[in-house]
Image: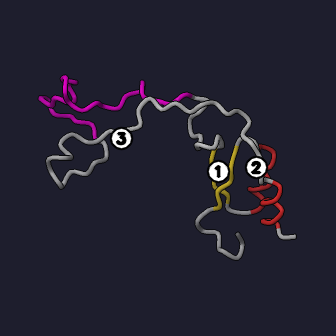
Amino acid sequence: VRSSEFFKNKMANVVPLNKTKIIKKRTKLFSRHHCDKFFKLKRSWRKPRGIDNPVRRRFRGNRLMPGIGYGSNKKTRFLMPNGFKRVVVNNVRELEVLMMQHRTYAAEIAHGVSAKKR
């Protein structure tokens, strides 16, 4: 029996250890000031640093800035929707280590692993 078949059969009906409901305080991305006005500005967040910038000064009606208060619950941080934490695995030895924590972590096969060894 190949190891991949063994793990596939063994891990078919594993349920996560704690299924705490994942609550996101904000699902919309924080976008950069003026990214809608100028095409050269990408959407990814950059902190505004100008002395007169209304976003930095937190004027009403302007974009929100990310802050520590938007952080996730420590228990549900890094969880996938199915309740597991994702771990990238490069070989069978790393996968065997995860067998001890199989109710917490889910293995993701690394990009560099060939189709033959998957």
Q: Secondary structure at mark 2?
A: helix
Rate crowding at label 1 as few (under 14), some (14 to 19) or many (20 or more) other CA atoms within 10 Å: some
Give percent across and percent down for residue 27. Answer: 41, 37
Q: How far apart are the alpha carbons under marks 3 and 2?
A: 33 Å
Name the residue that disc number 2 marks.
98
Which residue sits at x=22%, y=24%?
58
Where, by quadrant of the figure, is residue 3 drawn?
Answer: bottom right
Q: Please identify, in this view, whether the residue under mark 3 or under mark 2 is nearer the observer.
A: 3
Its colouring scheme is secondary structure
Q: Amino acid at mark 3?
A: Leu
Determine whether, in the image, residue 38 is placed left or right of residue 115: left
> Residue reaching furthest right?
1
Q: Secondary structure at mark 3?
A: loop
Q: Secondary structure at mark 1?
A: strand
Give percent across and percent down for residue 110. Answer: 62, 62
Determine whether, in the image, residue 3 is placed left or right of residue 84: right
Q: Are marks 1 and 2 in contact (CB under 8 Å)?
A: yes
Q: Which residues are magenta?
A: 46-73
Magenta stretch containing residue 69, yes or no? yes
